[in-house]
Amino acid sequence: MDTIASLFAFITTPVSWIIVQFHKLYGAIFGPDTGWAWGLSIVSLVVVIRICLIPLFVKQIKSTRGMQALQPKMKAIQERYKNDKQRQSEEMMKLYKETGTNPLSSCLPILAQSPFFFALYHVLSEIASGDKIGVLNDSLVKSAREAHIFGAPIAAKFMDDPDKVTALNASLTDVRIVTAVMIIMMSLSQFFTQRQLMQKNVDLTVKTPYMQQQKMLMYIFPVIFAVMGINFPVGVLVYWLTTNVWTMGQQMYVINQNPTPGSKAQDQYLQRLLKSVTSHGEVRGRRRRSVVQAIVAKGPDRNENERRFIGALAKAGFSAQADGSVAKVDPAVAEAQSAAAARRQQPKRQPKAKRQAATGTPQGAAKTSLEKKADEPQDAKPKQEGGAAGGSARQAKSGQRKGQQRPKHPSSKK
């Protein structure tokens, strides 16, 4: 880890400068040698970095949704060229180019954070050794070494030996308890973030291998962070826990305000929008009007959530307009229009030749029961009738009365 961190030594000066500037602010409030001053400086560093990465986060969302939409086409390409890997790769790249989708965009925020993460790790490692680094002079390094967060120095690690922890004026028990709690919180926040994405913001109508991969990552990433966390200083754990909480909150906002079409989150959003429209009689807010406008523009291509929303609006006596507003109409008329639109969205019945081609049945091979009956030889019918008559005679002989009976003679006593 130290070798990797040294590769990003070029960025340690900007990172240390940002920390020092925030330390001046928080040091004036909490005291320059306190864990609060140094810990909040690291938290503020995360906030600054994540604000700068918001454009990459937006690009990540668009790329993730684009990849979800492309999964059926990608699966078809894989099946078509499963024996030709080169052609498969060419068709995949062609698909990415046509749709403007980049698979690596979903990793951009993590990749962009990596230099800052390793630079902070390098800074804290030098602080633990008592060496100057970046803009941190001897007095600042000494102040950082004396800073404790809940009894654990910001430069201490879970795997440090007792002598090193004692040199930082702390106890090994305090260090391991604090680092263990922070590692657990870091892993749980990572798990909850991925779980929130999988359960609420994925189009459940499309079952693809991409969903299975994301589900696996939901369990793998927390384990990876937990294993790596035992070698992280307390300050780095503060950094990573803060960035996980930021990601979780940022994702929660996106899921609630701009959900993926066809997802559970979209259904919940449209229910809130419906409640607002029925309460106020109008669509409030420019962003909400753009959502209604997009749903109206889709026409027959609406998903199930959007069709339910339009139908619920009709039952409430509203009709969605092309500009994103709603108009008050008679509920019976609006519901009839909604029902007619739903019928138009039903797929047309394919001709017989296309149905047979889809099922692999050759034309003329499948016959109806009437056609099979017509093809049977005519001399088979008397046998069937005779067999039926014989069966009736046997049933009558056994005492069962079936069918129309002949009237008794008047002279008969029975």
Image: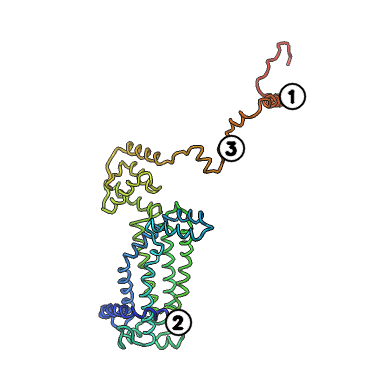
Q: Secondary structure at mark 1?
A: helix
Q: Assess disc 1: are there few (<14), some (14-19) or many (≥20) residues with their C-alpha within 10 Å of its C-alpha.
A: few
For badge 1, the amino acid type reads Lys
- Distance Cα–Cα, label 1 vs label 3: 45 Å
Residue topped by disc 3: 365
Residue topped by disc 1: 397
Q: Secondary structure at mark 3?
A: loop
Residue sitting at x 32%, y 46%: 297
Query: Is 105 on the left or on the right of 75, as rendered?
Result: left
Residue topped by disc 2: 173
Total marks in image: 3
Query: Is 134 on the left or on the right of 212, as rendered?
Result: left
User: Which quadrant would residue 48 be assigned to in this image?
Assistant: bottom left
The coloring applied to the image is rainbow
Q: In the picture, which quadrant includes the N terminus?
A: bottom left
Q: Position of residue 258 (x, y in %)?
A: 34, 56
In the rendered view, tell whether residue 337 sits above or below residue 176: above
Q: Position of residue 67 (x, y in %)?
A: 41, 58
Compare residues 158 and 275 and report the one nearer the observer.
158
Q: Position of residue 142 (x, y in %)?
A: 33, 87
Q: Are marks 1 and 3 in contact (CB under 8 Å)?
A: no
Q: In the picture, which quadrant includes the C terminus?
A: top right
- Distance Cα–Cα, label 1 vs label 2: 99 Å
In the rendered view, tell whether residue 241 sits above or below residue 348: below
